[in-house]
Amino acid sequence: MAFESLTDKLQNVFRNLRGKGRLTESDVKTAMKEVKMALLEADVNFKVVKQFIKAVQERAIGADVMNGLNPGQMVIKIVNDELIKLMGSETTEIALRPGNEVTVIMMVGLQGAGKTTTTAKIAGKLKEKGRKPLLAACDVYRPAAITQLQLNGEKQGVEVFSMGDKQKPVDIAKAAIEHAKKNNFNVVILDTAGRLHIDEDMMQELTDIKDAIQVDQTILVVDAMTGQDAVNVSESFHEKVGIDGVVLTKLDGDTRGGAALSIKAISGKPILYVGMGEKLSDLEQFYPDRMASRILG
Ligand code: GDP
């Protein structure tokens, strides 16, 4: 389970603090050194760790804590508050156009991150909200991707628009939007092609789509198991293509979880959902406060 080791380590630090009736500045500093190690071992980005420790320490060494009745508890509360802040404080929803206006969502990400699966998962969530989504198969490089999207669409009861693998992604996207307008769909989700690594061609193709059509939301799918890489990928995609939010997949796996804590701080963009399994229902809205509670155990 994600965060297991981080939770254990943080609980150890806090257990030591709780035992003390009064906290000295040096108690706080020692505890913060241990928290720092725990976060680094959980693969949290080092810049993020540095800022986080500074923020917690500044607050924890303040007079309130020193004179507080239960200083250990106070430090835990500060760590909790700062973890929530790190993850963006609020829950961010996918912004949709009102009524029957068509919202265009472009899904982007590296191959294997879980993009095609997540596309179908999001379609299911939107359907639950009473929307009528259309999935568009714009990954023309992997014929299997089209079939996979069609199978997933069928499972979700959502139509998939495909023009095979001989057309350009931009043209498929345009045709899908036309199809949506004519047939009363109000969301189009474009499943675009991923590559094994970030490369210029992929970024160019995504920018071309954005130049040619009005994309309302660009959602990046990253794999939590890749740790720091997930954070770097988020930063690159945001710089080159521009993203509005991130879906962090495979958080059900044995990941150290650092990506969940670093993505917002590094890319500036919030996590919208987390993937919690392979089933199409395994997608959860991201709540920074619940995630912080989970981390603290
Ligand atoms: P794509 O290449 O980015 O389109 O990735 P896919 O959607 O094909 O997913 C790659 C693999 O990851 C598949 O085996 C998915 O079932 C799996 N996967 C996707 N999301 C999750 C998740 O949240 N948890 C787990 N455990 N597996 C996932």
Image: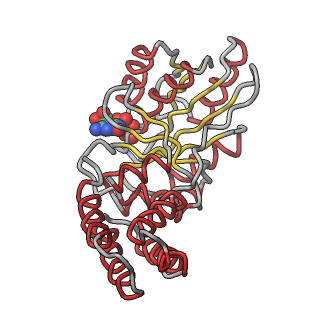
Q: Considering only vertical position in the picture, is 5 above or below 182?
A: below
Viewer can see residue 197: yes
Q: Which residue is at 50% across, 38% downward? A: 192
Q: Nearer the viewer, residue 132 or 140?
A: 132
Quarter of the image where one finds residue 72? bottom left
Q: Position of residue 122 (x, y in %)?
A: 50, 30
Instruction: Answer left or right for 113 relative to 101.
Output: left
Q: Position of residue 258 (x, y in %)?
A: 36, 60
Instruction: Answer left or right for 47 relative to 276.
Output: right
Ligand 1's quadrant = top left
Q: Nearer the viewer, residue 206 or 35?
A: 35
Q: Nearer the viewer, residue 17 or 106?
A: 17
Q: Position of residue 129 (x, y in %)?
A: 59, 21
Quarter of the image where one finds residue 233? bottom left
Q: Position of residue 10 (x, y in %)?
A: 30, 65
Quarter of the image where one finds residue 133? top right
Viewer can see residue 51: no
